[in-house]
C-alpha cells in the first residue's frame, strides 16, 4: 500500500526528509542508502549538508549506491551523475570514498559493469532505504517507459524527454547529453527494504496521479512501486495537485 505525505512546499519536504535520513543513520549507523540524482533531491542534499556541518548526521559507516549513470563518460566528467553527487552531497558529509558505489559510465564492458553493480548491492546486504525521484514520463532511475522493463541493472537508451531534462548538466546542449545510460532495474529497486519517492512541482502531478490511481503498467515504470510493501510518496502540494 502506498503511503502519501504532502508538505506545503519543497523546503519543508527537504527538511523533513533530511531528518528522516539522519534518524535512520542514528538508528543503524551502517545503513545502506540508495540515492537519486536530478533536480528534486538537490534541496534534500543541501539540508543533509547543513546537518553534517553541525554534526547532526553521521555518514561515516554508511554505504551508498546511486541509481544510475550516463554511458560513455567518466566519473570526472562535469556532467556525470558522480560529479553531481560529489558537488551536492558527498563533499559535504563525512562519508568515506570507499563506501560510495557508482556505476562506471566509462566501463569497456557495460553489461559486465551492470552485473558487477548488482553483485555489489547483494554483497552489501541489500539496500535499507532507497530514495527515488520520478521523471515527467514516469521513469524511475533510468527505467524508461517501454513494452517491458529490465529487472536488474542494465543498459538503456534514453527518451528525448529524459535527455532534455538533463541538458543543464551539459551546458544546456541537448546534443551533448549521452543517448544511453546504465541504471538499476526495477527489481533491484524493489528489493530495497524501504522506498521513499520524492516529487515536487506541478510537472510531476499527472505522473503522481497515474502512479496512485492508475494500473500497473510498463508505460509508467513508477507504477511498479505499488508492488512494494513499504513505500511512501513524499510530495509538495504542487505534485499532489490531482490526488
Image (cartoon, rainbow, N blue to C red):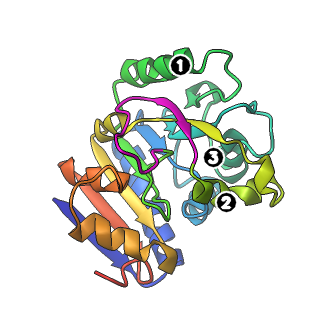
53 sits to left or right of 124: right
Q: CA distance from mark 2 to mark 1?
A: 25 Å
x and y, in percent, of residue 225 in the image:
28, 52
Give the answer, above or below, for where 224 lies relative to 71: below
- Where are the magenta residues, as a range? 143-158
Residue in view at x 37 percent, y 67 percent: 234
Q: Report if residue 157 lies within the magenta region.
A: yes
SS of the residue at dot 2?
A: helix
Packing grade of label 2 (10 A; few <14, some 14-19, many >=20) is some
Please give the residue where the numbered disc 3 appears in the rendered image. 93
Sequence-earlier tag: 2 or 1: 1
Q: Report if residue 92 lies within the magenta region.
A: no
Residue in view at x 31 percent, y 35 percent: 187
Q: CA distance from mark 2 to mark 3?
A: 30 Å
In the image, farthest residue toward the front: 147
Query: Which label number is shown at residue 164?
Result: 2
Amino acid at each position: 500500500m502506498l503511503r502519501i505525505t504532502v508538505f506545503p512546499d519543497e523546503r519543508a519536504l527537504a527538511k523533513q526528509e533530511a531528518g528522516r535520513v539522519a534518524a535512520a543513520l542514528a538508528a543503524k549507523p551502517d545503513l545502506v542508502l540508495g540515492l537519486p540524482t536530478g533536480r528534486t533531491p538537490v534541496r534534500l542534499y543541501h539540508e543533509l549538508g547543513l546537518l553534517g556541518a553541525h554534526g547532526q548526521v553521521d555518514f561515516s559507516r554508511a554505504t551508498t549506491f546511486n541509481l544510475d549513470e550516463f554511458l560513455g563518460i567518466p566519473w570526472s566528467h562535469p556532467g556525470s551523475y558522480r560529479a553531481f553527487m560529489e558537488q551536492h552531497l558527498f563533499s559535504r558529509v563525512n562519508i568515506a570514498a570507499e563506501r560510495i558505489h557508482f556505476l562506471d559510465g566509462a566501463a569497456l564492458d557495460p553489461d559486465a559493469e551492470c552485473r558487477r553493480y548488482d553483485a555489489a548491492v547483494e554483497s552489501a546486504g541489500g539496500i535499507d532505504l532507497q530514495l527515488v525521484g520520478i521523471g515527467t514520463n514516469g521513469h524511475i532511475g533510468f527505467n524508461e517507459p517501454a513494452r517491458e522493463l529490465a529487472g536488474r541493472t542494465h543498459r538503456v537508451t534514453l527518451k528525448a524527454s529524459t535527455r532534455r531534462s538533463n541538458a543543464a548538466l551539459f551546458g544546456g546542449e541537448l546534443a551533448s547529453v549521452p543517448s544511453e545510460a546504465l541504471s538499476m532495474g526495477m527489481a533491484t529497486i524493489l528489493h530495497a527494504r524501504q522506498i521513499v519517492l520524492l516529487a515536487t512541482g506541478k510537472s510531476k502531478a499527472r505522473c503522481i496521479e497515474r502512479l496512485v490511481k492508475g494500473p500497473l503498467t510498463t508505460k509508467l515504470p513508477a507504477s511498479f512501486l505499488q508492488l512494494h510493501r513499504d513505500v511512501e510518496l513524499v510530495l509538495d502540494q504542487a505534485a499532489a495537485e490531482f490526488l
